Image (cartoon, grey):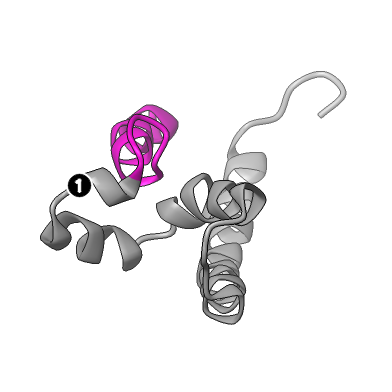
Amino acid sequence: ALERLQFIPFVFLSGLLAPLSAFPPEVRAFAQWTPFPYLIDFPARVLAGQPVDLMAGFGAQLVWIALLLPLVLLLWRAGVRRYSAMGA
């Protein structure tokens, strides 16, 4: 259920549906404060050879990893503790 809840913001804010440059400046500014543009928009711009601040992009990715990895590990452990099946 969490994955489906995350899918809509991911589609719009990652640049998957349309490039972030096509959105109004307010939406672009909001998107830059989320992890989504660093999943699709940033790598696509790097591969396309468009001007990108590589240090800021990779730095933002590292910050999001540092923020979200402990949460993922905590949720994973709680899920494994609650669910057990044959071979799990």
Q: Position of residue 21 (x, y in %)?
A: 29, 51
Q: Give the total number of marks visible in the rendering.
A: 1
Question: Helix, strand, or loop for circle 1?
Answer: loop
Q: Quadrant of the C terminus?
A: top right
- Give the farthest residue toward the right: 87
Q: Is residue 12 magenta?
A: yes
Estimate how packed mark 1 is, as few (under 14), some (14 to 19) or many (20 or more) residues with alpha carbons within 10 Å: some
Quarter of the image that includes the N terminus = top left
- Most common SS among magenta residues: helix
Of 66 and 76, nearer the camera is 66
Residue at the image point whose x is 63% and y is 32% from the top:
83
- Residue 49: percent from left, percent from top: 61, 55
- Residue at the image point whose x is 43% and y is 53% from the top: 37
User: Which residue: 65% across, 44% down?
Assistant: 81
Q: Which residue is mark 1?
A: 23
Q: Which residues are magenta?
A: 1-19
Q: Quadrant of residue 18?
A: top left
Q: Is residue 35 left or right of residue 72?
A: left
Q: Nearer the viewer, residue 25 or 80?
A: 25
On the image, the x and y values in percent for residue 84 come to 70, 29
Question: Residue 53, position in %: x, y?
Answer: 53, 75
* Residue 38 included in the magenta stretch of the image: no
Q: Foreground residue, 32 or 51?
A: 51
Q: Seen in the image, is 85 located left or right of residue 4? A: right
The residue depicted at 29 percent of the width and 58 percent of the height is: 31
Residue 62 picture quarter: bottom right
- Above or below, 35 against 44 in this view is below
- Give the amino acid type for the residue marked by disc 1 in the picture: Phe
* Vertical order, 72 against 56 (above or below): above
